[in-house]
Image (cartoon, helix red, strand yellow):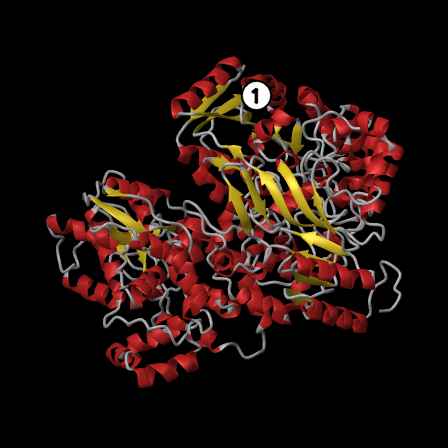
Amino acid sequence: MTDLPHGTDLTARDLTALEGELRAAVRGAVGFGARDRALVTMDASNYRRVPYGVVAPVDGDDVAAVLAVCREWQVPVVARGGGTSIAGQATGTGVVLDFTRHMNRLVALDPAARTAVVQPGLVLDRLQEAAAPHGLRFGPDPSTHGRCTLGGMIGNNSCGAHSVAWGTTADSVRELDVLTARGRRLRLGRDWAGAPDGLRALAEGELARLRTGFPDLPRRISGYALDALLPERGADVARSFCGSEGTLGLLTEAVVGLVEAPRARALAVLAYADESAAAEAAAGLLPYGPLTVEGMAADLVPSAADLPRGGAWLFVETGGESRAEARARAEAIVRAADVLDALVVTDEAGQRALWRIREDASGTATRMPDGTEAWPGWEDCAVPPARLGAYLRDFRSLMAAHGLRGTPYGHFGDGCIHVRVDFDLLTPAGVARFRRFSEELAELVVAHGGSLSGEHGDGQARAELLPRMYGPEMVGLFERAKAVWDPDGLLNPGMLVRPAPLDSHLRFSALPREPVDVAFGYPADGGDFAAAVRRCVGVAKCRTASVSGPAVMCPSFRATGAEEHSTRGRARLLHEMLAGEVVTDGWRSAEVRDALDLCLSCKGCRSDCPVGVDMATYKAEFLHHHYAGRRRPAAHYAMGRLPVWLRAVARTRTAVLVNALAGTRPFAAPAKRLGGIAPERDLPRVARRTFSRWWERRRGEAPGRDTAGDLVVLWPDTFTEHFSPAVGRAAVRVLEAAGLRVALPPTLHLRRPPVGDGRTVALDPLSLLRGRGRVCCGLTYVSTGQLDRARAVLRRTLDLMEPVLETEAPVVVLEPSCAAALRTDAPELLHDDPRAARLAAKVLTFAEVLERHAPGWTPPRVDRPVAGQTHCHQHAVLGDAADRRLRAAARLSGELSGGCCGLAGDFGFTRGHYEVSTACAEDQLLPSVRAAADGTVVLADGFSCRTQLEQLAGVRGRHLAEVLAEALEDSPPARGPV
């Protein structure tokens, strides 16, 4: 191999040769393509580096082989776990090792010894799940526990909420298997076990400095933990390795200790006037032996959060052998604390809901209350707990002096504060202020006896400032330690020692400075698509392997486990598309198209992502540009224009013929091939009589159905109209039973109200020439990125709906996906037409209209359990609180599952999607239905959900309106044929 100076960029020919050598040397995956590189340019920090390539090693031998090749080429090697690091240490310019794909196993668990053997790519929650049946757990638990890896936790010496009880990751490490950059295999432990040549001599020559040069803090993470090598501390090489951020060696296996989990827990929520008061109180609670003392202020709490009155809160968890013992300990803390108000929660569901608020803070904090962006960089400084209140006041003053804002929160019991600050990292002046603030804050932290990092490590964000904390001599000792372990400087260069400047490699610098020309309005991002894309800060909540409760995000990642199928992975690819360095063909990018292809447009990320990334909208935007002036996939024509084809069937009254042909294999198979439809799918049967035709006939037979109740306009969506008219009929039955007057939208252009009496019509003179029209939400066009057609359809719809917009009547939409499209897609796509926002404001779900417009109505008593799934769009956009209350009033007991059914409109019908579609259904929906007892009502308000249930499980799902209408059968019938 050629003699390349370290850090020299490789030519294209060199990269091809390097890739070839790696492929020959390892059994794991090697990726040097644009997609593989783009996915790992960033972690959860402000930094971005473009690597040469990515390797997913299968085992330690693969890691050794990568090191051997990269050592010959003098190419850096960067270890990466879940990519949730906040200081930039999981980014690099050489070869990135992705340990999550293969080296992710729990090798062994010994309950008697309370130890586990883990690989570096194992996600923390998987270890916790395996330990729980034995009454054990791993002590440290960062808020990213559902996606962070043990290797990353060891590299950063992570902590989490329970560190006041169980310490940092270093406190739980027993032995580490490590490979040095020069290929030595070491087994690190106590009494100098595994120490590389020269480390003992280095430490023993600096004993005085090691004894006096480190602040005594529970959360001192900054720098190398060389004081763990002191003889009085057991000369623990494994402990000293923790927090080294992949700069000393590469971890291949770890023996970690487990702790006994309390049998029961209670959560005391203590309310204070402000965060300083909460901070002052935190240290005084430590003598009571709490498991957590977490703090947060009102800025980070959703308005609906059920917390005691106050401006800031401490979350203090206690444990015990029983719920009563845990509660007693929590109540003792409440009595001892000087609080404005307090709440003690012992039920697990209530505790989970409260902890979710705290765990989402790392994402929530990236947006100020006014929508301004805020960023990490000074994410986790720590001071002695007794000094936390004073430090917070000085910190607030420093931010004010620089004209900056941020909301501190975090581990108050350990004196560790997280905060995201509204730095301007887009302009030279803003970046210069970021540097000045960082330098002054470092001085402030040191003045309070603190550590620049109290949890997430130094990385690039803080390493440059370590001399202010430790002095030049100690930093020089760090550099000498690095040289002992990695004399060639190949492991994660630019981190911890000889660091890159804290204001270099900022990820925002690569994005275009001028707004990109786009179709959607992106109102929450100032109309700037780049701002929408940079919402993703990398906390990776979308990478969790399972969801609890009603959560949805991200079903495609759970189905494939591939980063490019996570919301974060797709956002990274869009970021690189805009940057143009790695993904170079812009909107025509095949890499971005392929990653978005398996996005179900479920909108789960819109609500479940802490920063509200809306990948369904980004996908529609991308497809709009990608196929502009080009031939589209067949499915876009077959299913994207479904309303057109179904209206043609209705006009020609050929539903019987179409159904017969669709059910006959010689006709169905070629039709599916031509339409890009999955051969495994049965084509849904078209209704012989549409809902609107039933309505017209019914109105003609019984014209005098007016009541004194409110007028409601029932939206005849495409799916109810043509596939499930029984749902529409049931809804009319229930709405009228509740005393409401039901009308359908106009089908002719009217000049003015009234609407809905079936007799008075004021026609636009041109309306007869235009012919009858039907309203449509444009959903199928939006989901396939046919945004010009969607706009045209929506404008025609708004023309028809103008008389309705002038009334007080709500618009009831039975299909959740159509309701979501009218609520969000329509006003964002027609951001220049105020009528779209007016229509969006009128849209109500079936349950919402009954609750708001028939509040005195009592639904029929059903008295049956329910199973099924809350529609993903309902969860993400509409909310299901009214549905829950309606079900409770009707005595429908039980909870619906979260997730996505996997059919998701056209997604599950598209050729090539069947396997992922069924995997999504198996994630939540199908198991919940299979586990249901006899007599359970299977609820599925969405047509896609009902179709998926029928085709995959042979189960008939029903809309809530159908269930209530059936229960009304024992009531006196309404007039006319219902």
Residue 635, given in percent of the width and then of the height, sits at: 45, 75
The amino acid marked with disc number 1 is Ala
Q: Is residue 167 visible?
A: yes
Question: Is residue 159 toward the left or the right of residue 951 in the image?
Answer: right
Question: Is residue 884 toward the left or the right of residue 627 in the image?
Answer: left
Q: Is residue 527 visible?
A: no
Q: How many labels does the image show?
A: 1
Residue 60, given in percent of the width and then of the height, sits at: 66, 56
Q: Determine whether 332 is above or below 145 in the image.
A: above
Query: In the image shown, does 928 or 264 lie closer to the viewer?
Result: 264
Q: Determine whether 273 is above or below 857 in the image.
A: above
Q: Which image quarter holds the N terminus?
A: bottom right
Q: Which image quarter holds the C terminus?
A: bottom left
Image point 60% across, 18% down: which residue? Answer: 281
Q: Determine whether 795 is above or below 318 in the image.
A: below
Residue 8, given in percent of the width and then of the height, sits at: 86, 62
Question: Is residue 331 toward the left or the right of residue 426 in the image?
Answer: left
Image point 43% across, 45% down: which residue? Answer: 548
Image point 64% across, 38% down: which residue? Answer: 174
Question: Is residue 705 toward the left or the right of residue 298 in the image?
Answer: left
Question: Which class describes the residues within 10 Å of circle 1: few (<14), some (14-19), or many (20+)?
Answer: some
